Amino acid sequence: MQLSKKIAEDIYYVGASDRRLALFENIYPIERGVSYNSYVIKDEKTVVLDTVDHSVSRQFLENVAHVLDGRSLDYLVVNHVEPDHCGVIEELSVRYPGMKIVGNDKTVKFLSQFFSFDVKARAHVVKEGDVLDCGRHKLAFVLAPMVHWPEVMVTFDTSSGILFSADAFGTFGALNGNLFADEYDFDREWLDDARRYYTNIVGKYGVQVLNLLKKASGLEISMICPLHGPIWRKDLGYFMDKYRTWASNEAESEGVLIVYSSIYGNTENAVTYLAMALADRGVRNIHMYDASKTDCSVLLSECFRYGKVVFAAPTYNLELFPKMETLLLDLKAHLWQNRDVALVECGTWALQSGRKMAEILHGCKGITVVNDAVTSILSHAKEDMKAQFDAIADALAK
Ligand code: FEO
């Protein structure tokens, strides 16, 4: 059955959720699934804003046909070409032969790379500030390059104040009947996944996200309709502030994050002492993760969340333990910066992991290592090392 829902005057949700997919982009675990959002405007002209992933195409096509109720489709606005939103464009073109594809130059270029049908023949090319007159609704296009791909744009309906924001303001997680963020306990149920989605997918492009936020601040926005996750119609400032914090590489939460790798428990023993020493100094909100047991996307998201981070890892094959190396390289690739860190290494002979961690983090801007020399554990930390960990705790507790 069709599962569309009216969300505003003339505007309908026609997307769907996938709870079967294990890995989004074949890399990020999504235990709570993911939604692929799409919207229809039914005015003098009919418009679909973005399509969905192949996995939910049947539901999407049924929803669109129901909302159009026999009318033809005039326009498909493509805010983002990534296949999780373009999976159904070719099918839509076949079903609605008169449909024009609205996008910018890069949209047309990328779609022509992905598809074999004649994209140019259907293209209605727009640029920054152009307006598509649909009748009661006028759609203005705002370019948002690199939020998350170069062709990305967002669409602002000047009559309703609705911003169709592409990947921006999205989150992992399937929609469970409720479409709006204010119908959930967002902080408890969604925020961790929203942060993980933001930091992993668009975290590298903080500057571009801040540019988009600056453009958005000049608009009277009544609702934000992203391509993933719930729609925002209340408390827009709350989520925009979160985005501003994440995009600015600012710490969101007080506390200390400890990420460690430990082969036989010796590194873990040492950082557990450090965690207790931090607690003794009144630090709250200490989070510890074993990098071998926690997905890298969670660790990266947590590193963006905290301002103070301890990395502790053994030497392995005369290199840095691989799980820790993966995380640090991922942080560097995402332009993670402006943090206080402490580095702890462990090994029985020829210790290398501290130097390797420092080398990778040297490539990140604004990283201050609070224990100037890496703290080294030879095989197992003895009582006489407590003073060194107490000194790290003093520095991080400041
Ligand atoms: Fe949801 Fe960049 O695609």
Image: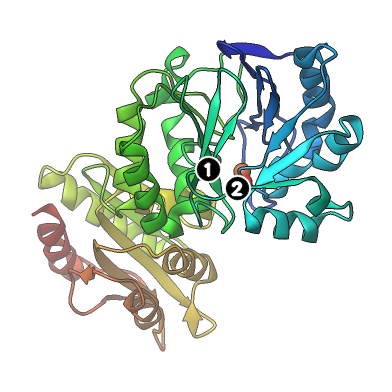
Is there any visible trace of residue 299 in the rendered image? no
Mark 1 CB in 8 Å range of ligand 1?
A: no
Q: CA distance from mark 1 to mark 2?
A: 6 Å
Residue count near mark 2 (Cα–Cα under 10 Å), binned few <14, some 14–19, many ≥20: some
Between 137 and 174, the one nearer to me in the picture: 137
Give the vertical position of 248 relative to 91 (above or below): below
Between 138 and 156, the one nearer to me in the picture: 138
In the shown orientation, is residue 299 left or right of residue 48? Answer: left
Position of residue 237 measured from the top left corner of the image (x, y, whole percent):
30, 29
In the shown orientation, is residue 82 left or right of residue 293? Answer: right
The residue under the point 37% across, 18% down is 234
Q: Amino acid at mark 1?
A: Asp
| Quadrant in which the C terminus appears | bottom left
Reading the image, the residue beneath label 2 is 126
- Residue 39: image quadrant is top right
Position of residue 228 measured from the top left corner of the image (x, y, whole percent):
58, 34
Position of residue 127 measured from the top left corner of the image (x, y, whole percent):
55, 50
Give the vertical position of 250 relative to 361 (above or below): above
In the shown orientation, is residue 255 left or right of residue 230? Answer: left
Q: Helix, strand, or loop for circle 2? A: loop
Reading the image, the residue beneath label 1 is 130
Cβ atoms at labels 1 and 2 below 8 Å apart: yes
Residue count near mark 1 (Cα–Cα under 10 Å), binned few <14, some 14–19, many ≥20: few
